[in-house]
Amino acid sequence: MHLDVRDLRNFYYRSALGRAAQRAIREKVTGFWPHPGLKGQSVAGFGFAVPLLRPYLRKARRVIALMPAPQGVMPWPAGAPNVAVLCEETAWPVETGMIDRLLVMHGLETSENPALLLDECYRVLGPGGTALFVVPNRAGLWSRSDRTPFGFGRPYSAGQLEAQLRAHGFEIRRHASALYQPPSARRFWLRTGRMAERLGRRLPLVMAGGVLIVEAAKQVPAPRRPGLAERVRRPLRVLEGIGAAEPARRRGLR
């Protein structure tokens, strides 16, 4: 079940906790993908990924914010030409192989058809294209609180997410976690949020991070050549069609 776009907007842009979460996750994402390195590439986000897309607006050749119909859409970015579009969850208005980098946040865990959604992610990525999936951590505090968007949908463990991505043709490259601060709007936790993120980098992946971030690349299978395989299965027989030799009859002695 997707959240309403107004609730997501209010959390990330109109609450102190949401802005802190946006900053913590975006710092991790730009650590994976520094925005100067995406110059001339096509970048897309699905779900509610717009808080993570802003750093790429100037350098990328094209930025598209895909928002699923059950969630709703809002114009984005503010004060600039709109790049947000409403789409069906498993049928995006994007040509096959058009996207170089894909960001998915608040899309996979709330999807009613995660398998078909991952197939669509695979379709729009070009050969060698990469995707970042941001999902609630099953072991984290944020997935246990319904005061934030990460408390809705299906939380994942690192192993579950990576196994699901591999089953749909993705190769896992790197993973990380973020949101080590508690999901609380109290001033103390907001003030110590940056320190919590720094300390959290030294902790195991599944202990405290509120979200998991997994980078995966599209794996293109090698083309098959049926001609060669057919020859191997049916080797050429040089003497095919020639009758089997019969032993000569021995002539009796006179």
Image: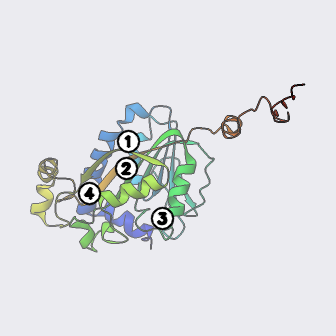
Earlier in the chain: of badge 1 and badge 3, it is 1
Q: Going by the picture, which residue comes out furthest to the top?
A: 254
According to the image, label 4 marks what residue? 21
Q: Amino acid at mark 3?
A: Pro
Instruction: Say if 150 sits above or below 239 in the image.
Output: below
Badge nearest the viewer, 1 or 3: 3
Residue 180 in sight from this viewpoint: yes
Give the number of the disc on residue 55: 1
Give the number of the disc on residue 114: 3
x and y, in percent, of residue 209 in the image: 21, 57
Q: Secondary structure at mark 1?
A: helix
Q: Residue at x 70, y 35 (%)?
A: 235
Distance from label 2 to label 4 (Cα)?
A: 11 Å
Distance from label 1 to label 3 (Cα)?
A: 27 Å
* Mark 3 Cα shell of 10 Å, populated few (<14), some (14-19), many (≥20): some
* Mark 2 Cα shell of 10 Å, populated few (<14), some (14-19), many (≥20): many
Instruction: Say if 184 sits above or below 62 in the image.
Output: below
According to the image, label 2 marks what residue? 52
Badge nearest the viewer, 4 or 3: 3
Q: Amino acid at mark 2?
A: Leu
Residue 13 in sight from this viewpoint: no
Distance from label 4 to label 3 (Cα)?
A: 24 Å
- The answer to whether marks 2 and 1 mark residues whose Cβ atoms lie closer than 8 Å is yes
Q: Secondary structure at mark 3?
A: helix
Q: Amino acid at mark 4?
A: Ala
Earlier in the chain: of badge 2 and badge 4, it is 4
- The answer to whether marks 4 and 3 mark residues whose Cβ atoms lie closer than 8 Å is no
x and y, in percent, of residue 122 in the image: 53, 50
Q: Quadrant of residue 49?
A: bottom left
